[in-house]
Structure formats: structure tokens, C-alpha cells
């Protein structure tokens, strides 16, 4: 058995691993598109075309009319548009995945609704439809389903459940643009699909968001929500309902628009790179890959797997550290289950009120405390992930495979 680099052996990779390639692909043409906007001196969406063209391009990519996409300032805002369009009463409940970016949860609280966490499925790492069904109450209005790390959740089952129970399905596709099930892209199964253009995502404007609505009524409501409730087409200025200013600038619109034609290629290359690593990691002791729902293809924001401390004798952080010592990247500890973070566990919301928790409008809720979603807690403790890139060469991927394999086999042999 080869000696591990963390214990003085020689590392799998001696020269620097190209972590720089995990950054976005920004070209000279993208820069020119932004410069052109700046030179035009109109930086505002309502005076220009770039944001509107971005919305139309996103709609076309997903087979929807242009009027059913609204751009906004972040992925969090994109989800807020959807929640705003659902228009919950204070104290209504919205079911959400516990392992995700906090941006999936903030919009629920911002609309004074209660995030109800349902457990994940041990195979997909995403919301378990059976757990969602158990979490539904007469106050439930919507489900926020996250396609974690780019992999589709069991979106067909969730869409069916949402329809049967009269709930809105909000797909959080921040990590999963053009991930698909049987060729149908994420964001088109539910009532809303929400995307992020933040720096780490497949294409980026630094910050930004896009929301896709399945019907014209909700599309119009979310568009108003992003623009102070202000119907621009009217003769008289008015504000029809509560909304925010979530307008994307023309500079952001231009740089994102320039990247849209490249997105499908980026996703394809990420999938092809991941298939190569899959072959290295199949059947390793103590390392388990997610098992996607039938027909699902991930967009690979990250490449996740679970490690088993009982087989390897170390936890996720110890495993990731030993793999990094081999000269390749591997991270652990993406997020804790979000109900354990202080903002939620201690109900730090609006002043000292704790609102909307405990408000007369709300049903009593179980404490946000360890034990709420046992499978998510176990997953969070065992999760490791490779920051993924379409730019990895065959050699990069093979070194990742060799390093993870070397560490898993050595640790399992010792622990066994
Ligand atoms: C799954 C998920 N949801 C929501 C968000 C929020 O997006 P943003 O950071 O653009 O507000 C992110 C971004 O990190 C995310 O990964």
C-alpha cells in the first residue's frame, strides 16, 4: 500500500493543480459588450435592451415566452420574486431543503412566511418527496426544491405532489442551469425556476438572478415584485402591491447575455469531465456518489460524494485533508443544516420579535434543533466535494481520481 502524502509519502500531484480554471470564462467580447453599455451612458434596464435581451435569451433556452423571465440582482432575489409572486400570508409555511445556500431560505422569511425543513433523500442528496409530503399542513403554500451541486432532485415526483396538493413548486436552480431530466431543463418542471449569476456559477455577472415562471399571471406578478410593484406600461404612475427594487443593470445584463450562448457547452464539458472521474471513484471503499433520479443529468456546479467514517476511520474533514495533501483540491463542510445556524435557531429575524415564528398568525413549530432532519445531518457530516471546472484536463481529472482512490484504499485497509 502506497504511503499517504499526509504521512510523509510522495503526493499524487507534484506540480500545482490549476484551481484558477474553476473561475468563470470571461472573454474579450464579454468585456466589449460591457464597455459598449458604459459608452452608451445608459446603464439602466428601462433605458436599454441588454437586460431585456438577456431575459429573452434565457426564455428561449428554456422554451418559454420572453415575458415569462425576469432578471434580478441575485439568486436570492430570483427566489424572492417567486415567493413574492406566490404572495403568502404572514405565518404561511414554505417547505425547503435543509442543505443549501441561505439564499434559498431568506426570501421565505422576508415575506414573513415560515421555512419548514423537510429531510433529504440519501441517494439524491436533495429533498425527499415523501418527507415533503409529511411536512405539508393546511398552511403550506409552496415548496422550494434545490438541485444541489447541479444535480436534479426528484423533480417529477415533487411537481406531481405540488400539483396534487395545490402548492407552488419553486425550483432553486442556482447551481443547476441546464441540468435536465430526459432532456427537459431544470426550472421548467415547477411553477418557477430560479437561477443565480453570482461569481462562482456556470455563467456570471458577478451578481445577478433570473426567474422563469410557468404562467403569464405569475410572470407578471413577479416582474412587478422586482420593480416596486410599478406597472411601467400604464399612463399614470402607480404601485400595485409591495415589491422591491431588484433591477439588474445594463452592464450586468450585457456581460451575462454575452455568455448565454456558451452555457450549453460549459455544462456539457463539466458533465464529460465528471463522467471521467465517476469511473475512477466507482466501487471505492467508504466513498459513495449520489444516485440521480432516472434520466437526470447534473450540471456539476460541484462534484460531491459522501465518505463513510465507519469504513475509513476518519471524518469528512480528515479525509479531505489527506486528499489535499496528495496535491488536488477536495473540500468538506459545505453548510450545516440551515436550521442550526443562529439566524434561524435563535430566530434572529425582526428586532427581538422573533417574527414570524410565534406570531398569532403562525402555527406552533418544532424547534430548529439537531434531530429535525437526521438524513441531512448525517449527509452534512459526511459530505466532501471537488470544486468543479470545465477546464480540467484529462490529467487533472485522473490525478483527482488517483488521489481520492489512494486515500480511500489506504484508510479503509487500515481501518478494516
Ligand atoms: C442553491 C443556491 N440557492 C440560492 C443561492 C443564492 O444565490 P445568490 O448568491 O446569487 O444570491 C445560491 C448561491 O450561492 C445557491 O447556491
Image (tube, rainbow, N blue to C red):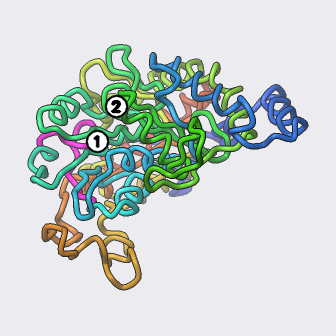
Q: Is residue 155 left or right of residue 246?
A: left
Q: Where in the figure is residue 47, as x and y percent of width and height? A: 74, 37
SS class of the residue under badge 1? loop
Q: Residues within 10 Å of mark 1 (few under 14, many from 20)?
A: many
Whole-angstrom CA distance, mark 1 to mark 2, is 8 Å
Q: Residues within 10 Å of mark 2 (few under 14, many from 20)?
A: many
The residue at which mark 2 appears reads as 152
Q: Is residue 286 magenta?
A: no
Q: Where in the figure is residue 132, as x and y percent of width and height? A: 16, 45
- Please say if 166 is above or below 297: below
Q: Nearer the viewer, residue 11 or 67?
A: 67
Q: Is residue 117 magenta?
A: yes
Query: Which secondary structure is most common in the magenta stretch?
Result: loop
Q: Is residue 393 left or right of residue 374?
A: right
The residue at which mark 1 appears reads as 126
Q: Quadrant of residue 359?
A: bottom left
Q: Which mark is residue 258?
A: none
Name the residue located 32 percent from the left edge and 55 percent from the top edge: 380
On-image quarter of the N terminus: top left
Q: Quadrant of residue 388?
A: top right
Does the rendering let one see residue 95? Answer: yes
Q: Where in the figure is residue 387, as x and y percent of width and height? A: 54, 42
* Magenta residues (range): 115-130
Q: Is residue 270 left or right of residue 26?
A: left
Name the residue located 53 percent from the left edge and 42 percent from the top edge: 231
Amino acid at each position: 500500500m502506497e504511503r499517504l502524502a499526509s504521512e510523509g509519502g510522495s503526493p499524487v500531484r507534484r506540480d500545482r493543480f490549476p484551481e484558477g480554471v474553476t473561475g468563470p470564462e470571461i472573454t474579450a467580447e464579454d468585456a466589449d459588450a460591457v464597455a459598449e453599455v458604459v459608452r452608451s451612458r445608459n446603464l439602466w434596464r428601462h433605458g436599454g435592451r441588454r437586460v431585456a435581451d438577456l431575459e429573452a435569451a434565457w426564455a428561449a433556452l428554456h422554451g418559454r415566452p420572453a415575458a415569462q423571465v425576469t432578471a434580478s440582482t441575485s439568486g436570492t432575489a430570483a427566489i424572492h420574486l417567486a415567493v413574492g409572486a406566490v404572495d403568502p400570508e404572514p405565518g404561511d409555511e414554505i417547505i425547503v431543503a435543509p442543505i443549501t445556500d441561505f439564499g434559498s431560505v431568506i426570501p421565505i422569511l422576508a415575506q414573513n412566511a415560515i421555512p419548514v425543513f423537510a429531510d433529504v433523500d440519501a441517494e439524491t442528496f436533495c429533498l425527499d418527496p415523501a418527507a415533503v409530503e409529511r411536512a405539508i399542513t393546511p398552511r403550506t403554500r409552496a415548496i422550494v426544491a434545490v438541485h444541489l451541486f447541479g444535480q436534479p432532485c426528484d423533480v417529477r415526483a415533487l411537481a406531481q405532489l405540488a400539483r396534487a396538493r395545490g402548492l407552488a413548486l419553486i425550483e432553486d436552480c442556482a447551481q443547476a442551469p441546464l441540468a435536465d431530466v430526459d432532456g427537459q431543463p431544470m426550472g421548467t418542471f415547477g411553477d418557477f425556476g430560479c437561477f443565480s449569476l453570482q461569481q462562482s456559477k456556470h455563467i456570471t455577472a458577478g451578481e445577478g438572478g433570473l426567474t422563469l415562471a410557468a404562467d403569464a399571471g405569475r410572470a407578471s406578478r413577479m416582474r412587478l415584485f422586482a420593480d416596486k410593484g410599478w406597472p411601467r406600461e400604464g399612463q399614470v404612475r402607480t404601485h400595485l402591491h409591495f415589491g422591491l427594487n431588484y433591477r439588474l443593470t445594463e452592464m450586468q445584463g450585457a456581460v451575462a447575455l454575452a455568455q448565454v450562448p456558451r452555457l450549453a457547452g460549459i455544462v456539457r464539458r463539466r458533465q464529460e469531465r465528471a463522467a471521467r472521474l465517476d469511473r475512477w471513484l466507482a466501487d471505492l471503499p467508504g466513498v459513495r456518489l449520489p444516485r440521480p433520479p432516472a434520466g437526470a443529468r447534473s450540471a456539476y456546479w460541484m462534484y460531491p460524494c459522501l465518505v463513510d467514517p465507519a469504513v475509513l476511520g476518519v471524518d469528512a474533514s480528515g479525509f479531505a485533508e489527506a486528499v489535499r495533501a496528495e496535491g488536488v483540491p477536495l473540500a468538506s463542510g459545505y453548510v450545516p443544516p440551515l436550521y442550526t445556524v443562529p439566524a434561524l435557531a435563535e430566530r434572529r429575524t425582526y428586532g427581538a420579535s422573533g417574527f414570524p415564528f410565534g406570531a398569532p398568525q403562525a402555527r406552533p413549530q418544532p424547534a430548529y434543533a439537531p434531530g429535525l432532519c437526521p438524513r441531512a445531518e448525517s449527509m452534512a457530516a459526511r459530505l466532501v466535494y471537488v470544486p468543479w471546472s470545465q477546464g480540467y484536463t484529462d490529467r487533472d481529472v485522473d490525478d483527482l481520481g488517483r488521489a481520492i482512490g489512494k486515500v480511500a484504499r489506504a484508510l479503509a485497509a487500515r481501518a478494516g
